Structure formats: structure tokens, C-alpha cells
Amino acid sequence: MKVSACNPDAKPPGLRGLLYGAFCWFNRHIIVLRGIGALLRLWPSLGGRFGLAARASAVKGVMTRPRSFSNSAHAPDLVAGDYLIAMDPGPTYDADRALLEKRLAGLNVQADADQEAQRRVTELRQLGENSFDLIDDYLMWIAFHAIQPVFGTAASEVAAGAGGDVKDMGLQRQYLLEIRYVAGQLLAGNLSTLGVQRRAEVRADSLRARIEGVSSDLQKAWSSPFDVIERNAVGLAWISHPVTVQSGALVVQELLSRPKVYRTLRSMAAKAAGRVWADNGFRECVRDHVLELMRFRPIFPLLARDVPRDTEFETGGRRNALCPGGGKVAIWSIAALFDPRAVPDSGRFCPHRDWGDEEGLRWLMFGYGDRQCPAKDYAVEILTSVLIGLLTMPELRLARDDGKAITYDGPLMSRMRVRFARQA
Ligand code: HEM
């Protein structure tokens, strides 16, 4: 998520392009951000001078003071209108959060994600040596089938749009692309180029029109007044699916870069054989791996907060960081996730680590404290189904045949071509 405090309109186009390019590069090369994070941990008072919180204690301190370090920093990037993630605590926030939790409680993500993953695995197995796109042909649909039921009986209408054929996959794809661009703006914020911003704004308008078009279906499904529905349905549409898909792609990317871990998990899946989807012990083991893979490649390595009035935070060093009102601070989650003071053996890939008192930190990829992601358990369950499905497929390799296997659209991965490895 963007952390720049400078006025976006004041930037000349060349500089804007350069900053956006640099931002995307850092997002793709998370190891560099980790390295900078390690330096900030080493000299916390120095980072504090620039409003950067890096040590685990500092990050937790900032994230548990939502009135001093406000989520309103997200507000300018919500191109589709106000939503929960950028609100300060208050009655509207409480009501929207309660509505979301109620909608989430009605989901059956494990069953829905498992079912779609199995269906997709069967289909993809037919491809033989042909490559396929792990995002477009696999991840996107598992997340879609698991999350879309938050819209209840209006789920298909939201995806197809008013009057659209609910069975038309093309319309569903268009919807998924629409919400991806809106979510992309949350990540890149005012650093994105004007073209990228315009694209997000156009897609945001389509999303709002789409929700308005199916308002009566939604009113029946949610039994809430329209103004509440509009804000929450629009917000929920873009915040839920793209982030989950992108996290799934990052998890797979990290797994493929660890052949030993991948091999071990595949052989466990092979041993579980017919019980692979029903074996609770195996599922738990895969879930632990999902969290550890996410730790190495979090989708939000940095988060921003507004500072409404003069305050300070404890950096963990000799000096507190002074934070003047009207400014911003940057939360370096990527540094905290690897802080050896809080995470035992922090540099090692260790899915079954004993986190002791720091269990909360294990979920830092989903935020921390009261503003932590309300869907974290659901999202991890979806990614667990994604990974189990993947482990039941023949071994996968990145397919570099027509250029790069991974294509990016700004900070987001848009394609990940893979193919089954030839069996010896
Ligand atoms: C792997 C997938 C996901 C990741 C990595 C993720 C990550 C995050 C993070 C880091 C935050 C905190 C932002 C901050 O503190 O500034 C957050 C908040 C939020 N997430 Fe997620 N999220 C995921 C999936 C979802 C899904 C599926 C939904 C909805 C169904 C969702 C809805 C929200 C909402 C509404 C908030 C704002 C909560 C608040 O401010 O009270 N997220 N998410």
C-alpha cells in the first residue's frame, strides 16, 4: 500500500512514472524490502525520524492505536467510494463491520473452495503438456466460488450485472477484472500513473453502476436499506476477491521457489491419496505452510496511517518517533515479520514454529489489533484448498516458453504460466 505523503498532483509525469516503477519493482522484489527492513530494525530511532515503524514492538504499538494512527490514510485510494478499511472508529464503522461479519458467517468457504479446486484440477489434468495460467484458470475461480456467496441470493446477479446471463463466463471474467483494477489502486495509491488511476476510476464507476443495477436483488438478499448496501456491497466486491487471488499467486510463487518443501508436501499428498481432501491432519499442515509462505511474500509488506494530531510512537530504540499532526507513518510489516526479537528463528522457513506469546504476529500479513482483516480465517481456508488442489496435480513448473512466465500489471501479478513437469 502506498506510503507517500507528497501531493500527487504536484508531481511531473516523468517523476510520477519513475516513482510508480520503483514502487512496483520493490513490490516484486520483496527480498530488497526485507533487507531495508532489517536495517530499519537495526537503527529504529533513525527510521523513526522519518515516521517508519519497523521493529515488531513498534509495528504492534502503532497498529493498536487506531485513534492516533488512523486508517483514513487509505481513503484517497478508495476509488469506488468510502468503505470500512478507511473509516475511523464510530457508529458507521461498527455497523458496517457487524454487517460484514454476519455475511462472512454465512459462508461455507472450505466446502465451496474444495469443490471448485477439485473440479479445476480434473479439468487442468486433461491439458497434458500444454501450459496454463494459474491465475486465470485456477486461483481466480476457486476464490470466486468461495467468496461470492457473501452476496447471498444475489451472488450470480452481482457477477453478471443487471440483465446479464448468469451463466456467461465472459461476464464473470469482466467482473473479476473490474474489481482487480479497483483493488490495485489501494495497493499503489497516489504513486500510480494517471493512466492507471483513470483505469481504476472507470472500473470503479462500472462497479458502482453494477451494484445499483442489482440493488433490489441485494436488498432482498441482505434485508438492509440501499445506502448501507451500496457502500458495503461495492466495498466487499473489490476488497475480497483480488487480494485473495493475488495472495494465492504469491503463495504459489514462493512454494515453487522452494523445491524441497514442494516435494515434501507432494509426497504427503500422495500418501494421503483418496483421503487427501478429508485428512484433517494434512489440511492443518498445509494451512501452516500457507501462513509461512505468506510471511515470506505478504501482499501488503507496508501499510500507511494518517496522524490526526501530534503524537509519538515507541520505536524500540533509544528515542521515540515524533509524529506531527497532519503527517503519515509507514508500518513496515515485512520488517516486523522477520524481527528476531519476536519471531524465533525468523529467517528460516518454518511452518510449524512455536510462536509462543506472539501468535498474533503470525497473522500480521492480515494486519494487527482491532483493524485486522475480518476475513483472515476464511482467506487462509481458501488458500489451503488452493494448495491442496495444487499438490494433487502432477508437479508444476513455471512455463517460460513464450517469454516470461510471470507477467505483472503494476504491482499485481496478472499472469502466471505453468505446466506439468515431464515425469521421469
Ligand atoms: C489473503 C487474503 C487477504 C489478505 C492478505 C488481507 C489483508 C488485509 C490487511 C493487511 C488488512 C488490514 C489493513 C490495515 O490495517 O490497514 C485487511 C483489512 C480488511 N480486509 Fe482483508 N485480506 C484478505 C482477504 C480479505 C477478504 C476475503 C475480505 C472480505 C471478504 C477482506 C476484507 C477486509 C476488510 C473489510 C478489511 C478492513 C477491516 C477494518 O478496517 O476493520 N479481506 N485485510
Image: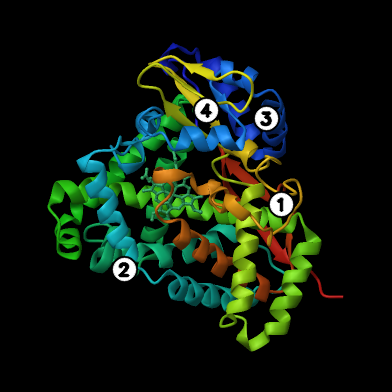
Query: Can you tell which mark lies on residue 213?
Result: none
User: In the rendered image, which residue does mark 1 sit on?
Assistant: 402
The nearer-to-camera label among 1 and 2 is 2
Q: Nearer the viewer, residue 78 or 307?
A: 307
Labels 2, 3: front one: 3
Residue 41: mark: 3
How far apart, in angstroms, are the residues tagged by discs 1 and 2? 43 Å
Kindly identify the residue that appears in the image at 39 percent across and 62 percent down: 147
Categorize mark 1 by other alpha carbons within 10 Å: few (<14), some (14-19), many (20+). Answer: few
Q: Could you tell which of marks 2 and 3 lies nearer the N-terminus?
A: 3
Q: Secondary structure at mark 4?
A: strand
For marks 1 and 2, the one nearer the N-term is 2
Q: Secondary structure at mark 1?
A: loop
Which image quadrant for residue 84? top left
Q: CA distance from mark 3 to mark 4?
A: 13 Å
Reading the image, the residue beneath label 2 is 106
343 or 136: which is nearer to us?
Answer: 343
Residue 277 image point, x, y percent: 57, 80
Residue 409 placed where, x, y %? Answer: 55, 40
Instruction: Answer with mark 4 or mark 1, whichever residue precedes in sequence.
Output: 4
**Residue of label 4:** 330
Kind of residue indicated by mark 1: Asp
Circle 3: residue type: Arg
In this rendering, position of residue 24 left or right of residue 66: right
Q: Are marks 2 and 3 in contact (CB under 8 Å)?
A: no
Quarter of the image with the C terminus in it: bottom right
**Residue 274 position in % (x across, y down):** 63, 88
In this rendering, the answer to whether 254 lies above or below 205 is below
Quarter assignment of residue 41: top right
Q: What amino acid does circle 2 point to?
A: Gly
